[in-house]
Image: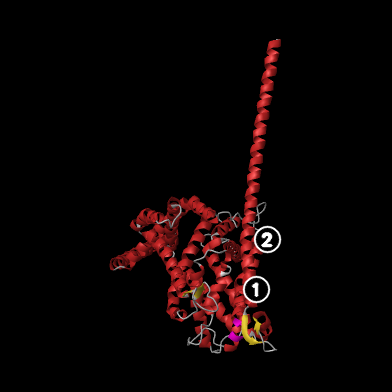
């Protein structure tokens, strides 16, 4: 009996020790997870601080450079020239406040138009989606696009915002990819239209690299800005057209994926060819799915393309309207205003092409630099400079216009976007972090596309087959054979209706005869 008790006690001790070991392991795993989560949150915070710091530092540097740049206006003593910040009172006293108010209206209208485009895409899937939700989604996406290099954070932020707005994550991914396809395609068309004004920038000041001694240009290299414009346009065109053609051509797809990536890897232009190959396969597959979805609703695709063109045009016309606000032009007729707005639209596209070559958060610094180069007055040899009022140039109006344009289109919207991203609430937002993890937004969005690919492909194929059958029936009905069959069917239907009417008349006659006979019999009685 004692032996059994000792064995029982030993078993209990062993059991207690094993339980304690299990509890300790669970505690260690929990502590490890909490530490990893803490490190992850800290890394997320560091990313935000880094990107916001880059934007802040570059913004302050650009502001200081613009405000401290010189003008052609002499000071009261006649010995020195005034700085830009000293000419502020003169510029704003003569401001055209009518054009200034109209400029603010166009900025707000273009933003609302962009939100309406997103709203239209969302309403394809659900009738419960509201316009204010679309605007919140757009502003949050713009915020993450601004704080991440190359703007890669905006897409995944919009997908997760759709999820919090009770829209399926696969649907949100489809919407984001379709908007990207339409925007890039329309931007490519706008770039082609802008090439009609390419001659205007051939005489624009070149980008000077290096510095000579005592004003000599011995150690300097002058690079025409048009080279960067054309390079940016060709890069965008190659990427978009390659993705579209690869979506339709299996042969081109296999050639680029296998031989093209391998060749670029051998030239050391791509660090990890296998990883790049996987990313390209995912992008092409998603393009194929969403392009097919857009093809199933041609009227809608045309509508959102026109709206997107309107958004890009109004965004591009803002610098010209800022110029009219600051009296930068001598011409003030309606045709001159339209011509300047169109030219500004073309310059804006050149600006986007050039800035797209450098993936800087918010395009800070490079945006202001390219803008100044595009809209500056090269010299007297230029017959038609963009800004035609000499007083505006002499007073240092260009840096002031640049600041006005950048404040209205980036700095103030960026602050508003940040507030919306931090304070926006929806039903699925409670208990979650206010900011998304932006440690690797490009990879995160690729993961989302992979996870939702099968579901989106199934729905897209089903919709494509259904629409194809409807189109086939419509084309058949419009063909001579279809029209003949339609007429024949119409005649058969008419004959069948006549036959039914005759049967009804005969049945009514029979009924009347029966009723008449019954009445006659009643009278005889």
Residue 395 visible to an observer of this rendering: no
Q: Which residue is pictured at 66% across the width and 29% down the height?
A: 21
Residue placed furthest toward the top: 1
Query: In the picture shown, does residue 229 fall above or below 99?
Result: above
Tell me if 275 is positioned left or right of 26 in this view.
left
Tell me if 22 is positioned left or right of 273 in this view.
right
Which one is in front, 140 or 221? Answer: 221
SS at mark 2?
A: helix
Which one is in front, 295 or 363? Answer: 363
Across and down, in percent, residue 392 comes to 60, 86
Which one is in front, 3 or 265? Answer: 265
Q: In which quarter of the image is residue 502?
A: bottom left
Asked if the stretch drawn in magenta spans residue 396, the answer is: yes
Mark before the other along the chain sequence, 1 or 2: 1
Q: In what quadrant of the picture does the C terminus appear?
A: bottom left
Across and down, in percent, residue 324 comes to 58, 84
The residue range painted magenta reads: 393-397
Across and down, in percent, residue 54 comes to 61, 63
Residue 9 visible to an observer of this rendering: yes
Asked if the stretch drawn in magenta spans residue 324, the answer is: no
* Number of dots carrying numbers: 2
Query: In the picture shown, does residue 328 fall above or below 207?
Result: below
For label 2, count other residues whose C-alpha is less than 10 Å away and answer few (under 14), some (14-19) or many (20+): few
Q: Is the magenta stretch mostly helix, strand or loop?
A: helix
SS at mark 1?
A: helix
Asked whether the beta carbons under mark 1 and mark 2 sit within 8 Å of each other, the answer is no
Q: Which residue lies under the disc numbered 1?
A: 64
Q: Which residue lies under the disc numbered 2?
A: 423
- Colour scheme used in the picture? secondary structure
Q: How far apart are marks 1 and 2 (CA)?
A: 31 Å
Q: In what quadrant of the picture does the N terminus appear?
A: top right
Tell me if 215 is positioned left or right of 198 in this view.
right
């Amino acid at each position: 009996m004692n032996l059994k008790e000792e064995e029982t006690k030993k078993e209990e001790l062993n059991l207690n020790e094993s339980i304690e070991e299990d509890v300790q392991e669970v505690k260690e795993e929990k502590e490890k997870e909490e530490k990893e989560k803490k490190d992850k949150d800290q890394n997320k915070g560091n990313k935000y601080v880094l990107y916001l710091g880059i934007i802040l530092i570059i913004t302050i540097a650009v502001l200081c450079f613009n405000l401290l740049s010189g003008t052609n206006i002499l000071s009261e003593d006649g010995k020195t020239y005034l700085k830009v910040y000293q000419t502020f009172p003169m510029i704003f006293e003569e401001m055209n406040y009518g054009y200034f108010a109209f400029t603010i209206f166009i900025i707000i209208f273009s933003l609302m138009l962009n939100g309406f485009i997103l709203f239209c895409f969302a309403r394809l899937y659900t009738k419960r989606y509201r316009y204010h939700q679309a605007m919140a989604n757009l502003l949050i996406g713009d915020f993450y696009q601004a704080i991440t290099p190359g703007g890669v954070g905006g897409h995944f932020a919009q997908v997760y915002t759709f999820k919090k707005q009770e829209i399926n994550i696969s649907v949100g991914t489809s919407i984001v990819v379709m908007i990207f396809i339409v925007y890039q395609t329309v931007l490519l068309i706008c770039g082609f239209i802008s090439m009609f004004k390419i001659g205007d920038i051939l005489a624009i000041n070149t980008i000077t690299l290096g510095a000579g001694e005592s004003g000599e240009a011995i150690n300097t290299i002058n690079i025409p800005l048009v080279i960067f414009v054309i390079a940016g346009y060709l890069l965008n065109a190659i990427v978009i057209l390659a993705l579209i053609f690869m979506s339709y051509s299996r042969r081109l797809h296999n050639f680029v994926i296998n031989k093209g990536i391998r060749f670029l890897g051998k030239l050391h232009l791509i660090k990890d060819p296998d990883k790049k190959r996987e990313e390209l396969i995912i992008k092409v597959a998603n393009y194929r799915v969403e392009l097919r979805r857009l093809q199933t609703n041609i009227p809608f695709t045309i509508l959102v393309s026109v709206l997107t063109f309107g958004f890009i045009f109004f965004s591009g016309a803002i610098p010209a309207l800022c110029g009219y606000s600051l009296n930068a032009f001598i011409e003030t007729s309606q045709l001159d205003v339209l011509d300047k707005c169109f030219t500004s639209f073309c310059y804006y596209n050149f600006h986007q092409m050039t800035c797209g070559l450098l993936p800087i958060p918010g395009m800070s610094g490079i945006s202001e630099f390219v803008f100044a180069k595009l809209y500056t007055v090269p010299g007297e040899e230029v017959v038609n400079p963009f800004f035609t009022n000499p007083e505006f140039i002499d007073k240092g109006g260009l840096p002031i216009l640049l600041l006005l344009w950048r404040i209205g289109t980036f700095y103030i919207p960026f602050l508003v976007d940040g507030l919306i991203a931090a304070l926006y609430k929806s039903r699925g937002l409670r208990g979650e972090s206010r900011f998304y993890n932006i440690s690797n937004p490009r990879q995160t969005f690729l993961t989302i596309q992979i996870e939702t690919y099968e579901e989106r492909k199934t729905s897209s194929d089903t919709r494509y087959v259904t629409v194809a059958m409807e189109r086939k029936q419509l084309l058949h009905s419009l063909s001579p054979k279809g029209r003949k069959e339609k007429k024949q069917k119409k005649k058969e239907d008419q004959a069948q209706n006549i036959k039914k009417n005759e049967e009804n008349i005969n049945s009514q006659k029979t009924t009347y005869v029966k009723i008449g006979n019954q009445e006659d019999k009643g009278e005889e009685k």
